[in-house]
Amino acid sequence: MTETDAATPRERYRSQVRAEIKEHAREQIATAGASALSLNAIAKRMGLSGPALYRYYAGRDDLITELVIDAYRSLADALQAASAPGPDPAALAHAMRRWALDDPQRYLLIYGTPVPGYHAPDHVTLIANELMTMLLDACSVTPPDRPTTPLDAHLENHRDWAAHHPAPPAVLHRALSLWTRLHGVLSLELAGHFAGMAFDPALLFAAELEDLLAD
Amino acid sequence: MTETDAATPRERYRSQVRAEIKEHAREQIATAGASALSLNAIAKRMGLSGPALYRYYAGRDDLITELVIDAYRSLADALQAASAPGPDPAALAHAMRRWALDDPQRYLLIYGTPVPGYHAPDHVTLIANELMTMLLDACSVTPPDRPTTPLDAHLENHRDWAAHHPAPPAVLHRALSLWTRLHGVLSLELAGHFAGMAFDPALLFAAELEDLLAD
DNA sequence: TGCCGTTCGTTATAAGTTGTAACGCCTGCA
DNA sequence: TGCAGGCGTTACAACTTATAACGAACGGCA
């Protein structure tokens, strides 16, 4: 998935084992969450002893980091595919929602509670920028038609994160709202905080989206 | 804080030690997150040996559960205080934001990524209902004046979670939006996803709130 | 005042975890 | 065919949560 098939047999074998390790890690995370990831358990399931894994990953953090990068890459691909027919904020939002519900722990791996000490490597911020660009592209069609808000004025002077993008402040505003509303519904839903409430989160999601695009 | 001062000296001593354990746990969580909570470390800092703590808490989960309940209680109190002058959704929202920023890990303890296997005890759902009631009370003033949405219609038939509350569907809708928008901005902010973006999340938060109350 | 039981804190132990070190095999390259 | 490097192993260290068993201290009660 990430490693290209290499020239030498050794490297090919190595990347194959790395992929297999990640596969086991993914399914373990999907069922028990990232905090329950155990290198020992993965090793046992692969029929080899604990320390063997350290030939392939420097440690737990290294493995998780690569899973995070894979998750980002997968999300970026999904959103890219959704934007293929043309930029459309609603299509983008629904694609992201589908992607999250398809594997909740993978979503939480990216947007869930972070480990306080952990700092993301550059790869991650690069893909995050890519996601932001797609979001801005989608929000650039049908730009909002409403009076300037205080946030718009603020974003006029604090748009470093979109310096490369020609979108006007109102579009930046809309992109941020889309992102946070999406995440607001999604993360509470995935965390089970709607559990006993018996309403359909998809409709709340749709309502938030429609309200955003109605301006 | 939670235990009442008891009759016998033994019980008084016991509740005092329990409180001291929680105090250490709280500050440990505040700096390193809930996943890094170590009973051994707490014991050492209190000058006693590891297994001694098991006289006071059945285990790690038991301690965390009590911290979660305390956090809910603290949040409920903060929102109660904010609602004292009279129901006001904006005041409630800002109180919740202040409470979260005051101790991010405490907020994440409640609304962060949950452990897949874990199931909250009844106390928690009771306080959660209390929070929901305050939210509905606040949203009941200045009810939204807008045409009925599909979500409104859906909530008409799926309002078990607000069965005891007389609020109309549009108010339920607004309460849900307030909650999810609040959490959307807050959790991304606390997770550091706005890190390199250099805009002020407080203004985004204010804009989301104003948009919600403008209808 | 003295006794006696409950509770507390201890050490020892079990079963985990991550991660390092040292050793041998086996592969694949020259 | 030889040999160097990668690979997997066992052994070990330093952690963690959690239980068991023992001794001491404390408090209620006669």
Image (cartoon, coloured by chain):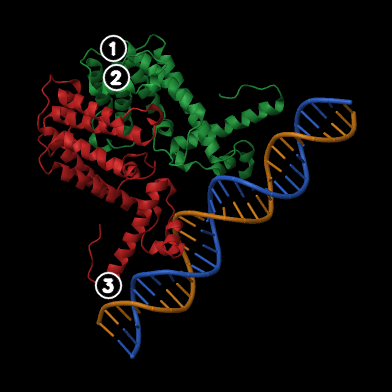
Chain colours: A red, B green, C orange, D blue
Crowding at dot 2, Cα within 10 Å, few <14 / some 14-19 / many 20+, comes out as many
Q: Are marks 2 and 3 on the same chain?
A: no
Tag 2, which secondary structure? helix
C21 sits to left or right of A29: right
The vertical placement of A148 against B43, above or below, is above
Crowding at dot 1, Cα within 10 Å, few <14 / some 14-19 / many 20+, comes out as some
Tag 3, which secondary structure? helix
Q: Which is more toward the observer, B6 or B126?
A: B126
Location of mark 1 (residue): B143
**Parent chain of label 1:** B
Determine which of the numbered discs, if any, sits on residue A9 in the image: 3
| Residue A155 visible here | yes
Q: Amino acid at mark 1?
A: Pro
Separation of residues labelled 2 and 3 (CA atoms): 60 Å
Residue in the image at 31% along x and 42% along y? A107
Determine which of the numbered discs, if any, sits on residue B174 in the image: 2
Q: Are marks 1 and 3 in contact (CB under 8 Å)?
A: no
Q: Which is more toward the observer, C17 or D27?
A: C17
Tag 1, which secondary structure? loop
The spot of residue C21 in percent (x, y) is 47, 66
Q: Amino acid at mark 2?
A: Arg
Q: Are marks 1 and 2 in contact (CB under 8 Å)?
A: yes
Residue in the image at 25% along x and 19% along y? B212
Q: Quadrant of the N terminus of chain B?
A: top right
